[in-house]
Structures are given as C-alpha cells and as structure tokens.
Image (cartoon, helix red, strand yellow):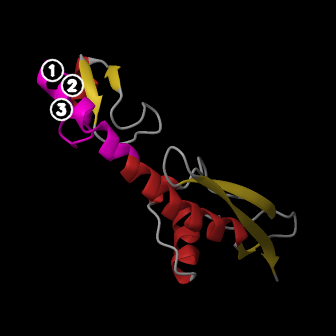
C-alpha cells in the first residue's frame, strides 16, 4: 500500500515522502495515528502544492531545535547509584531518569527522542544520542558514579 507520510518517522522517512508499506502496518499503525495518509492522486497533488510552505516551516523548526541541541550537548548529567563489593550496580539509569534531569534543567523533550536501547547498568561515562527530529540531533553526556 502506498502512503504519504504526514510526520517524520525515524525508521520510515520524512514528512511528504511517498512510501510503499505493508497493508497491515498502514491500516493498524500509520493511518489511525495520523502519521500517514493514503497516496491517492489528489493527496499527492495537494502535498506537492504545499511543499514550499513545509520547507520554510522545517527550516524554522531546525533553527529552534539547533539551539536546544546546543543546550543539550553542553549538559553533563550525573547520577549516583549504589554498588556492591564486586562493582556491580544496584539499579540502573533509564530514559525516565534522563528526562527528569533534563526537565530540571528546563529542557522539554519527548521520551522517544532519547535513543537508549537499554538502561545503563554500569559505572562510567556515557554519551546518549538524542534525535530532536530527522535533521537535528545531539548527545547527552551521562556520568554514573558509585555511591558509598
């Protein structure tokens, strides 16, 4: 099934792209959530006619998000967790911990923007990528220390 993406989807493409996807994926996920619409002739014509407006809007969004990305890149988040005698950490640092710390620093982002496949379960320094949109990304420095 051919669809036109209404929103950027990191795994599929950018808004305005025409993609061939499986019928079930389109019917059960993309269409009900408003992420895409069917690629009919009328829909394709309307998307092409509004392309210039979308480009200008995207450029403005990218400028604003670049400022946020610079703020994020300058921040180092520190977490302290208990550690046993063998050096294994009790607990972990998850996306929710990172979001709370960013919120305390007056930075609001969505949970899905943070690319952390699994919680951090070790002591050390880490860089966690944050994808603000398909064009703008940053890395958060995360430091996990042992708590006495």
Residue named by callout 2: 44
Q: Which of the 4 image quarters holds residue 146?
A: bottom right
Q: Measure the alpha-carbon separation of dots 3 and 2.
A: 6 Å
- Residue 95: give x, y in percent of width and height: 55, 61
Of residue 3 and residue 78, the one placed in the foreground of this image is 3
Residue named by callout 1: 40
| Residue beneath the point at 39% across and 41% down | 8
Q: Does 133 sit left or right of 47 as displayed? A: right
Q: Does 27 sit left or right of 5 as displayed? A: left
Of the numbered discs 1 and 3, the one sitting upstream in the chain is 1
Write down the region rendered in magenta. Answer: 29-55
| Residue beneath the point at 33% across and 33% down | 16
Please say whether residue 122 is visible from this viewpoint.
Answer: no
Q: Does 65 sit left or right of 50 as displayed? A: right
Q: Measure the alpha-carbon separation of dots 1 and 3.
A: 10 Å
Give above or below for 138 relative to 2: below
Pointers 1 and 2 in contact (C-beta within 8 Å): yes
Residue named by callout 3: 46
Q: Measure the alpha-carbon separation of dots 1 and 2.
A: 6 Å
Pointers 3 and 2 in contact (C-beta within 8 Å): yes
Q: Which of the 4 image quarters holds residue 31?
A: top left
């Amino acid at each position: 099934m051919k669809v036109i993406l209404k929103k950027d989807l990191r795994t599929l493409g950018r808004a305005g792209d025409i993609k061939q996807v499986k019928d079930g994926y389109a019917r059960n996920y993309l269409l009900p959530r408003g992420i895409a619409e069917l690629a009919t002739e009328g829909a394709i014509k309307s998307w092409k006619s509004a392309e210039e407006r979308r480009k200008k809007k995207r450029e403005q969004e990218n400028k604003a998000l670049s400022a946020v990305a610079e703020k994020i890149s300058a921040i180092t988040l520190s977490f302290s967790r208990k550690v046993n005698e063998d050096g294994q950490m009790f607990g972990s640092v998850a996306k929710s911990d990172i979001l709370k710390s960013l919120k305390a620093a007056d930075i609001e982002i969505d949970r899905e923007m943070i690319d952390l496949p699994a919680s951090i379960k070790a002591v050390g320094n880490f860089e966690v990528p944050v994808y603000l949109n398909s064009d703008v990304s940053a890395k958060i420095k995360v430091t996990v220390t042992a708590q006495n």
